[in-house]
Amino acid sequence: MLIQPYLFFDGRCEEALAFYGQAIGAQVQNLVRFKDNPEQPDDQPAGPRPPDGEKIMHASMKIGESLVNASDGDCLGKPTFQGFSLVINAKDEAEAKRYFHALANGGGVTMPLSKTFFASAFGMLHDRFGVHWMVMSPP
């Protein structure tokens, strides 16, 4: 069994994909825009429609060995990410510092990166989109 996170950026998905590419080396594997949907809105059940076909219906990005899925969702401009954190297990303290500071750019630090009894470096933050992260390196 494999579990993969699916993040809804509510209209900021393209910006998020670019940010994660720059910050932590995420590589977009697949990207489908709403305009690429062969079914016209009249063929679909009633519900929210994206404001423009350029918004992202589905994307997947590879981060290290993991795959994270993403979408613009309903495009209401109010992304919320609560009750979970994505964890980066860095190979060493230097890599942990690099990822931590890159992800915190435009976001906020919940717990500064520091040595703990279980890691040579551990810290918590939320990025500019509100996604919560824990970054750690081995003891």
Image: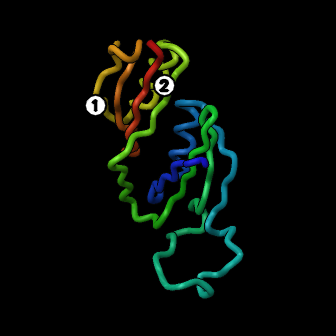
The circle on residue 99 is: 2
| Amino acid at circle 1 | Thr
Residue at position x 34%, y 30% from top? 124
Q: Is residue 7 left or right of residue 85?
A: right
Q: Is residue 114 above or below residue 22?
A: above
Q: In which quarter of the image is residue 117?
A: top left
The one nearer the camera, 115 or 43, is 115
- Residue 12 lies, in percent from the top left, at 48, 53
Residue 81 is left or right of residue 20, and the answer is left
Amino acid on which disc 2 is placed: Tyr
| Figure quadrant of the C terminus | top left
The residue under the point 39% across, 40% down is 85
Marks 2 and 1, how far apart at CA: 15 Å
Q: In this view, does 15 lie above or below 50?
A: above
Question: Earlier along the polypeptide chain: callout 2 or callout 1?
Answer: 2
Residue 55 % position (x, y): 56, 61
Residue at 58% x, 59% y: name it.
56
Local crowd at mark 2 within 10 Å, few (<14), some, or many (≥20)?
some
Left or right, 99 with reference to 76: right
Question: Which percent across, then down, holds residue 134?
Answer: 40, 31
Residue most extreme to the front = 1
Residue at the far left: name it: 110
Q: Mark 1 points at which residue?
A: 110
Task: Determine crowd level at label 1: few under 14, some 14-19, many 20+ residues with C-alpha closer than 10 A.
Answer: some
